[in-house]
């Protein structure tokens, strides 16, 4: 009990974001967007500028799809996001995005919370599919592991790759980061290529937390074969705030690092 109480005092910096928020990171957006979170009898206001101080110049229906995203403010690429502290992220103002309709006739700024990718990737379970355990540490740990898979599948430049600095330290122990370069699918899927689906991300049913270590299981199907990756996390005291980070990934009879 004492260990758990101490852990609750540790800052858990996970850069938690839902899939739509990830997709809004500049340079990683999908080709098409849709309106979300607007009542069936309402409309989404489209404004002249990024904020409610600007007048409404258009509206999008609650079921509008096929929107094109031009840019968003605040502007940041994944590299910028990974370099920010939790306090800096929380201090950012609400995001607004410049959107254009499929007909190319209507365009303007909308609140970022009301748009999401039109055809979200189903390779990785959605944030909503994660089962809440009632324990913030466990919930944030499984969200961090899911985030790692989402960012890895996005691809992008080396600076945005979770297996290269500076992004690596958002997910892994700082001391492990130099050993990650050149890795990727082998550590995530125990294979050089992946063609399948991650089916479940959840804390270990038998020992979700033991002596300060959290265990998260990732079940996936690759080329028709069921498999599991086991992620071990604990507080990385070498990083500011001692955030929980991944220090080991196991696949059957081998683990990384070996």
Image: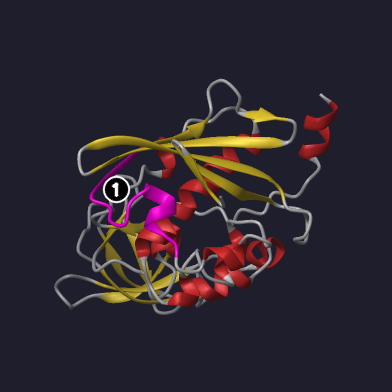
Q: Front-most of 204 and 140?
A: 204
Query: Can you give x and y, in whole percent of width and height, for residue 207 in the image?
Result: 61, 24
Observer able to see residue 50: no
Q: Front-most of 42 and 87?
A: 87
Query: Can you give x and y, in whole percent of width and height, for residue 188 in the image?
Result: 42, 50
Q: Is residue 103 above or below residue 123?
A: below
Residue extending furthest toward the left: 103
Left or right: 210 as drawn, with respect to 23: right
Density class for disc 1 (Cα within 10 Å; few <14, some 14-19, many ≥20) is some
The color scheme shown is secondary structure
Query: Can you give x and y, in whole percent of width and height, for residue 152 in the image?
Result: 41, 60
Q: Front-most of 159 and 100?
A: 159
Q: Tell me the residue that label 1 is attached to.
A: 123
Q: Which residues are magenta?
A: 183-199
Q: Is residue 17 above or below residue 254?
A: below
Q: Secondary structure at mark 1?
A: loop
198 inside magenta stretch: yes
Which residue appears at 77% of the width and 38% of the height?
8
For the image shown, how many numbered marks are present on the structure?
Answer: 1
Residue extending furthest toward the top: 206
Which residue appears at 67% of the width and 66% of the height?
91
């Amino acid at each position: 009990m004492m260990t758990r109480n101490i852990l609750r005092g540790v800052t858990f910096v996970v850069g938690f974001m839902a899939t739509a928020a990830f997709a809004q990171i500049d340079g990683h957006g999908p080709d098409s967007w849709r309106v979300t979170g607007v009542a069936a009898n309402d409309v989404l206001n489209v404004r002249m500028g990024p904020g409610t101080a600007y007048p409404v110049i258009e509206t999008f229906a609650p079921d509008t799809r096929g929107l094109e995203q031009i840019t968003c403010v605040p502007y940041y690429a994944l590299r910028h996001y990974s370099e920010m502290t939790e306090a800096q992220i929380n201090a950012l103002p609400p995001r607004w995005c410049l959107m254009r309709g499929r007909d190319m006739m209507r365009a303007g700024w909308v609140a970022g919370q009301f748009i999401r990718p039109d055809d979200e990737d189903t390779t990785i379970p959605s944030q909503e599919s994660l089962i809440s355990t009632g324990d913030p540490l466990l919930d944030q740990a499984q969200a961090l592991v899911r985030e790692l898979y989402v960012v890895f599948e996005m691809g992008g430049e080396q600076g945005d790759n979770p297996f290269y600095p500076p992004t690596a330290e958002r997910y892994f122990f700082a001391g492990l980061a130099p050993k990650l370069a050149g890795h990727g699918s082998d550590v995530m899927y125990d294979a050089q290529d992946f063609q399948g689906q991650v089916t479940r991300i959840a804390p270990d049913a038998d020992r979700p937390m033991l002596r300060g270590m959290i265990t998260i299981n990732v079940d996936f199907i690759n080329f028709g074969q069921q498999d599991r990756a086991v992620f071990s996390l604990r507080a990385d005291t070498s990083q500011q705030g001692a955030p929980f980070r991944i220090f080991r990934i196991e696949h059957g009879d081998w683990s990384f690092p070996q």
